[in-house]
Amino acid sequence: MAQSAALLSRIMASSISATVQAGKIIRNVLNKGGLNIVEKGKNDLQTEADRCAQRCIITSLSRQFPNITIIGEEEPSSCEVPSEWIITEADQEVLQLKLPSHLEEVNPKDVCVWVDPLDGTAEYTQGLVEHVTVLVGVAIGEKAVGGVIHQPYYRKDENSTYVENGRTLWGIDGVGFGGFTPKPPPEGKRIITTTRSHSDSIVLSAVKSLNPDEVSRVGGAGHKVILLLEGKAHAYVFASHGCKRWDTCAPEAVLRAIGGVLTDLHGECYSYNRETTYANTRGVLATAPGQSHQWYLSRIPDEVKQKLQ
């Protein structure tokens, strides 16, 4: 690896390679059929793929970057990690990026990496594999700066087969992005994406307040933000406590890299430093580039916001 590259570049480049390996693990577990599902809570499942993918990513990153903080969704494991899961490669394109001066010299103690090894577990267990993403978000201080979103199951259209190793989207706020081509959402209509499996009266009220022409209910925060990145939705709204920092850190960074916005339903940015709480208790609102984030915020009913204090 190019040790001369900045710490942020090296973490991002290594994260891209690690998520690709995690994607292979996720496909292998499903192919073998031994999901070994554990119910962590209501509408909160964990599979063998979640556990193995996290061990792959966290072990790979922690060995290369021992002085940064890494927080994963799943409980830490003391099981031995197979050598083929430990990734030392790094994406060369990202290593060559020119960073602005404030990102060139970063103290490792200020870096917190948030890992969701399998976002969209419920959909994964139901065979809705295109909803699944692997998320690695890189925060410096309180801010989500870099993000990697890997899709283990990706096809260019409904009639094509899955791309062999899926695809990986990445972005660094204020620097650049890769793995996808941003597209604006259609004019003359409003498409809102929201939760598929965590809906209730508050969630429905928030969605209805935005007067959508179309509602896209899909699994996983990563998948929802991909819809914004690719112009398939104008906004993503989730008026619930169910989302966590590892769900939003990577998507927020990638979205910001192309000019989009992600906040809570009060318009405040979430903090991603290592001391922060995990739950996004004030909901999530994300808007595609060119959309007025403030307009969407202003439409959310006060009673919804009060429920999410």
Image: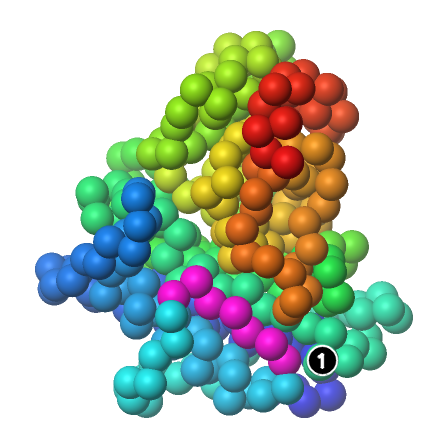
Q: What residue type is disc 1 on? A: Lys
Q: Quadrant of residue 263?
A: top right
Give the residue displayed 51% in from the left and 89% down from the top. 63
Q: Is residue 1 above or below residue 175?
A: below
Q: Crowding near pointer 1: few (<14 within 10 Å), some, many (20+)?
A: few
Q: Tell which of 148 and 221 is nearer to you.
A: 221
Give the residue displayed 80% in from the left and 70% down from the top. 103
Q: Position of residue 201 (x, y in %)?
A: 43, 20
Q: Is residue 119 above or below residue 230?
A: below
Q: Identify the element where label 1 is drawn.
A: helix
Q: Position of residue 115 (x, y in %)?
A: 49, 64
* Residue marked by disc 1: 109
Give the residue displayed 78% in from the left and 77% down from the top. 106
Please state the extent of the stretch shown in magenta in the rendering: 68-74
Q: Is residue 305 above or below residue 230?
A: above
- Residue projecting furthest to the left: 33
Asked whether residue 129 appears in the rendered view, the answer is: no
Q: Quadrant of the N terminus?
A: bottom right
Q: Quadrant of residue 211?
A: top right
Give the residue displayed 20% in from the left and 43% down from the top. 126
Q: Is residue 211 left or right of residue 298?
A: left
Asked whether residue 135 appears in the rendered view, the answer is: yes
Q: Tell which of 168 and 76 is nearer to you.
A: 76
Q: Position of residue 25 (x, y in %)?
A: 28, 68
